[in-house]
Image (cartoon, rainbow, N blue to C red):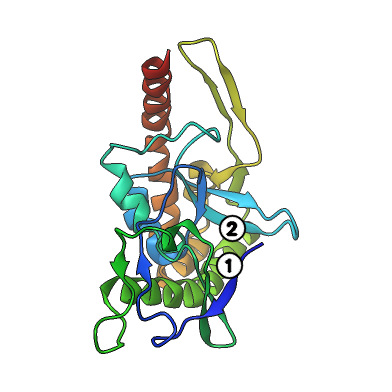
Amino acid sequence: MPTWEVLNSQVHADLRLGAPVVDERLFVQIVATEFESAAARFPILFSKKADTGAFYAGAMLGFKPGRPLLAGSRDLSDAQRLFDVEREGFYVSDDSIVIDRDHPRFGSAEGKPVFDWEGKPDEPLRRVQRALAQLSVGLEATDQFIRACLDLKLIEPIDLTFRFDDGEHLVLDGLYTISRDALGALEDAAALDLFRRGWLHLAYAVIGSLQHVPRLARLHNDRLAEVA
């Protein structure tokens, strides 16, 4: 069970924060303001929340649990800067920042101080605060974008089927993308509305990010060869 504590500069004066670990995170929820930067490194796809069935956007970081792809790659630092990764171990409750004291990020003596000598947030905590703020604002804005795409029937399932050199056959279900054909077939008024809302470039960022699927597949294949 998590041990919840309201973050406090006196109680947690000596608290140190390690780097977030992304090895077991295959699909990280992102918000619209991250789309362009995330699309430069990772596939952006949509999935449905298990409890509500509502769509959300995420960056794909891997294919299977226990098969981390990013260790030692240029992608690792980019993944660690995703807001939902950067805020790992930190949550917001009633306008206060709450931490899970048992989270592995707080167990490293080599971590960086959360507070400086004056009790003010040090750089690691300031990054977490920015991430939490961006998520708080960005989730609703992203939901609005997704609802607009659904209303325009732009979101469609994507076939992600892979066969690797070791004979492994992998099918990833329950993922969606934006249809390039449907986007191109929009009436002028609908396309202009997306543009004016700042959403048209987000749709194209999602489509363009699919170029990273085969790259991640090659990386997955290389990892299999390393352990063979």
The N terminus, quarter of image: bottom right
Amino acid type, mark 2: Tyr
Name the residue nearer the viewer: 138 or 19. Answer: 19
Are the residues flagged by discs 1 and 2 in contact, CB closer than 8 Å? yes
Give the labeled residue for mark 2.
Answer: 56
The quarter of the image holding the C terminus is: top left
Residue 76 position in % (x across, y down): 32, 45
Could you tell me which residue is drawn at 43 percent across and 43 percent down? Answer: 43
* Crowd rating for badge 1 (residues with CA inside 10 Å; few <14, some 14–19, many 20+): some
Q: Secondary structure at mark 2?
A: strand
Give residue 113's position: percent from left, percent from top.
30, 72
Secondary element under disc 1, as helix, strand or loop, is helix
The residue depicted at 54 percent of the width and 33 percent of the height is 64
- Relative side of 188 to 153, left or right: left
Where does residue 155 sit, x and y in percent of width and height?
Answer: 59, 49
Q: Specify which label sits upstream in the sequence, 1 or 2.
A: 2
Image quadrant in which you'd find residue 2: bottom right
Q: In this figure, which residue is indicated by the disc labeled 1?
A: 143
From the viewer's perspective, is residue 67 above or below residue 191?
above
**Residue 199 visible here:** no
Between residue 216 and residue 91, name the one nearer to us: 91
**Looking at the image, can residue 215 be seen?**
yes
CA–CA distance between discs 1 and 2?
A: 7 Å
Q: Is 209 rendered above or below residue 126?
A: above
Mark 2 Cα shell of 10 Å, populated few (<14), some (14-19), many (≥20): some
